[in-house]
């Protein structure tokens, strides 16, 4: 069977199922084969109920009792008690009412899922269930794949489909020349005999995926080198004079980055540079200097930021910085007299336009856009970036900025020759942020210290993992904490912020906070993005052990932006000894160091969530997988050296084209 064949050709996939799968982006046999298991169950690891510990567990037990309740909004909650010789444990299933009729109470089943504390009791949530006798008589393979469900198509269904096309999988040809073993790898991933087999199969597929990505990036670079644009060459004397008027001395890192940018812009190949700088390292100033240079050479600059608050903040601070030297305008959704402003942008009266997505609406036109800057670039998609670039008559120079440090070790392998400037130095005079790990049972001292800060008219962030108390875990929630804190600090203004609020509401709260009208802001991680509130001196992160190092570091970076001493309290979710991750963040404030540690501690996978899922769309591999990246890189080099003709590799070129669209930055 041809990999490009429609899934309807697979026995067992009728029109209804096909519909569901189409919605999930699964159209061809190839798509189906690449719907990989998210996990495996190894029932040989079953434990006695009495010896279970929180985390992933498998038990072999009988169902002692089971009931289903209808809850609000048509939710069905099925609760059961499992029992083996050693004890009993509760399990729950959400929205799987069929579970109530699934079990024969005289028979044993394997249950596999995650055990956690919920309202003071341990329970296993949404476990899988397999009749033990089937398994024990080896009717099924020793290792069972667990597929991510797609709508009504469950893991079990995917298992059946894969079984149906087992013989086809075994015959799949390699996609990349000189990289053998694809069929075997796919086979091992879907039908492994050992976990090790599954892992090595997955490694092959990850390398294959990275190959497409790296090849795409390389082709893009080659194409980029062929593009032409207008060089931006301003007057260096005027530029130096302007630097002399700045309210502070540039850091060495800022100087270096600015110099690199100015040199790039003076070329007739469009610049494509990523400015990476830890939170608070002063990226905005580098952007401002680049815009100054562009204006000086007669070009306009567009600076796009992800939120209205941030755009407004940039516009205000840069208008002040430039005085009458540059005309700065703000263009966001709520800008008044938009049409008039757009006229000024179109006829070139405005040098620097700062805005949100409003910048890329169809009727925003520039007279001579030479430089496009994207702040917090990981928050934007490819389409948005391209839309911004398309506002210029020729390809403009592009400067992307991000605060997500990419460890140096990774930069070398993946971003090899992408132009990257790094701000690895904080402006002088910053006070270090005193960071303390707090046990949940002893927060009294922390609250005392917070009260002192509030009395000194400083402001406080309080970050929670969840919005409300729905769901199973006992983590802190915004709604609950707001109540407690409002009660505790009656004389202060307490407000909350979370991702489910309307953008206008969020902006309003953020603005009030930035203006000092809110004393304590209880929020989810939505505050993570770039807003500068120098008067905020306390950051409390509840359940801090639930976050990655880089994220903790980003959150902490919201404070310590002024000249006052700042504090960050990391409240552990339990009274166990703090994890290595928390201890590292307590002792270091170097974002690059922490990113390296994160990479080591968590391994590939979680570090660059946004990079890989948003921008790079890697499904199997992660860019932090340096070993595989290296391997893929070698293959790509070989591929280019041998001058293979892409036309002969249809599947590969389709896959590469997808990544080419995604990686114009790299
Ligand atoms: P980020 O890199 O996180 O975007 P910002 O550009 O918001 O950082 O800068 C953080 C703060 O540091 C701002 O208040 C800015 O005015 C200030 N700043 C930037 N560069 C310097 C410098 N060289 N010396 C002192 N303060 C600086
Ligand atoms: Mg910033």
Image (tube, rainbow, N blue to C red):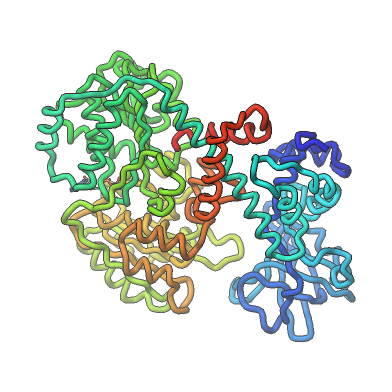
Q: Where residue 293 sits: x, y (%)?
A: 22, 28
Q: Where residue 539 sits: x, y (%)?
A: 33, 61
Q: Measured along the vertical axis of the image, is residue 649 above or below residue 79?
A: above
Residue displayed at 89% across by 76% down? 106
Q: Where residue 97 sits: x, y (%)?
A: 79, 59
**Left or right placement of residue 91 versus residue 209 in this view:** right
**Left or right placement of residue 246 versus residue 448 in this view:** left
The C terminus lies in quadrant: top left
User: In front: 371, or 491?
Assistant: 371
Q: How many marks?
A: 0
User: In front: 328, or 163?
Assistant: 163
Residue displayed at 63% across by 76% down? 121
Quadrant of ligand 2 in image: top left
**Left or right placement of residue 400 versus residue 8 in this view:** left
**Left or right placement of residue 139 versus residue 6 in this view:** right
Residue closest to the far top: 347
Q: Measured along the vertical axis of the image, is residue 395 above or below residue 615?
A: above
Q: Is residue 355 visible?
A: no
Q: Where residue 148 sits: x, y (%)?
A: 70, 52
Residue closest to the far front: 642
Residue displayed at 30% across by 31% down? 264
Residue displayed at 29% across by 72% down? 448
Q: Is residue 394 visible?
A: yes
Q: Measured along the vertical axis of the image, is residue 538 above or below residue 313?
A: below
The N terminus lies in quadrant: top right
User: In front: 248, or 410?
Assistant: 410
**Where on the picture, by quarter, is residue 485?**
bottom left
**Where on the picture, by quarter, is residue 248?**
top left
């Amino acid at each position: 069977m041809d990999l490009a064949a429609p899934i309807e050709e697979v026995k067992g996939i009728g029109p209804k199922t096909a519909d569901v799968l189409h919605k999930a982006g699964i159209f061809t046999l190839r798509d189906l084969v690449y719907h990989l298991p998210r996990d495996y169950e190894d029932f040989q690891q079953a434990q006695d109920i009495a010896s279970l510990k929180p985390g992933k567990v498998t038990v072999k037990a009988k169902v002692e009792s089971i009931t289903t309740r209808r809850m609000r909004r048509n939710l069905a909650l099925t609760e059961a008690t499992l029992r083996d010789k050693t004890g009993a444990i509760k399990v729950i299933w959400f929205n799987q009412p069929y579970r109530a009729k699934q079990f024969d109470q005289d028979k044993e089943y394997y249950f596999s899922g995650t055990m956690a504390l919920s309202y003071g009791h341990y329970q296993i949530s949404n476990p899988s269930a397999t009749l033990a006798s089937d398994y024990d008589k080896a009717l099924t393979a020793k290792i069972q794949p667990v597929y991510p469900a797609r709508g009504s198509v469950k893991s079990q269904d995917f298992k059946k489909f894969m079984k149906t096309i087992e013989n086809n999988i075994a015959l799949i040809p390699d996609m990349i020349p000189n990289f053998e073993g694809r069929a075997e790898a796919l086979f091992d991933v879907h039908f492994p005999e050992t976990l090790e087999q599954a892992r090595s199969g997955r490694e092959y597929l990850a390398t294959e995926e990275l190959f497409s990505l790296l090849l795409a990036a390389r082709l893009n670079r080659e194409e980029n080198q062929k593009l032409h644009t207008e060089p931006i060459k301003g007057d260096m004397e005027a530029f130096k004079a302007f630097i002399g008027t700045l309210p502070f001395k540039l850091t060495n890192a800022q100087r270096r980055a600015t110099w690199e940018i100015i040199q790039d812009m003076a070329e007739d190949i469009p610049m494509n540079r990523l400015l990476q700088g830890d939170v608070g390292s002063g990226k905005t100033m580098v952007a401002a200097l680049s815009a100054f240079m562009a204006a000086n050479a007669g070009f306009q600059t567009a600076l796009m930021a992800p939120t209205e608050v941030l755009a407004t903040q940039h516009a205000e601070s840069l208008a002040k910085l430039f005085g009458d030297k540059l005309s700065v305008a703000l263009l966001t959704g709520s800008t008044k007299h938009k049409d008039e402003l757009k006229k000024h942008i179109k006829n070139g009266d405005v040098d620097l336009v700062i805005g949100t997505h409003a910048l890329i609406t169809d009727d925003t036109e520039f007279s001579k856009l030479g430089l496009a800057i994207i702040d917090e670039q990981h928050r934007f998609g490819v389409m948005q970036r391209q839309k911004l670039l398309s506002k210029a008559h020729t390809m403009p120079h592009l400067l992307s900025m991000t605060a997500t440090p990419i460890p140096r070790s990774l930069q070398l392998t993946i971003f090899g020759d992408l132009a990257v400037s790094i701000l690895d130095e904080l402006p002088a005079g910053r006070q270090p942020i005193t960071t303390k790990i707090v046990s949940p049972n002893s927060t009294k001292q922390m609250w005392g210290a917070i009260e002192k800060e509030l009395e000194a008219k400083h402001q406080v962030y309080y970050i929670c993992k969840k919005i409300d108390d729905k769901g199973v875990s006992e983590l802190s929630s915004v709604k609950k904490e707001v109540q407690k804190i409002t009660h505790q600090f009656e004389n202060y203004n307490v407000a909350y912020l979370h991702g489910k609020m309307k953008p206008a509401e969020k902006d309003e709260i953020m603005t009030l906070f930035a203006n000092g009208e809110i004393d304590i802001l209880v929020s989810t991680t939505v505050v993570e993005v770039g807003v500068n509130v120098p008067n905020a001196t306390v950051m409390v992160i509840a359940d801090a052990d639930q976050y990655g190092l880089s994220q903790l570091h980003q959150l902490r970076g919201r404070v310590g932006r002024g000249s006052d001493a700042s504090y960050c309290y990391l409240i552990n979710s339990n009274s166990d000894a703090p994890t290595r991750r928390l201890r590292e963040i307590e002792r270091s404030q170097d974002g690059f160091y922490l990113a390296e540690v994160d990479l080591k501690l968590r391994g590939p996978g979680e570090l660059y969530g946004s990079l890989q899922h948003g921008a790079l769309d890697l499904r199997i591999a992660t860019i932090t997988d340096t070993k595989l990246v290296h391997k893929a890189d070698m293959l790509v080099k070989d591929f280019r050296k041998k001058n293979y003709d892409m036309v002969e590799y249809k599947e590969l070129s389709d896959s590469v084209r997808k990544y080419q669209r995604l990686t114009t930055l790299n």
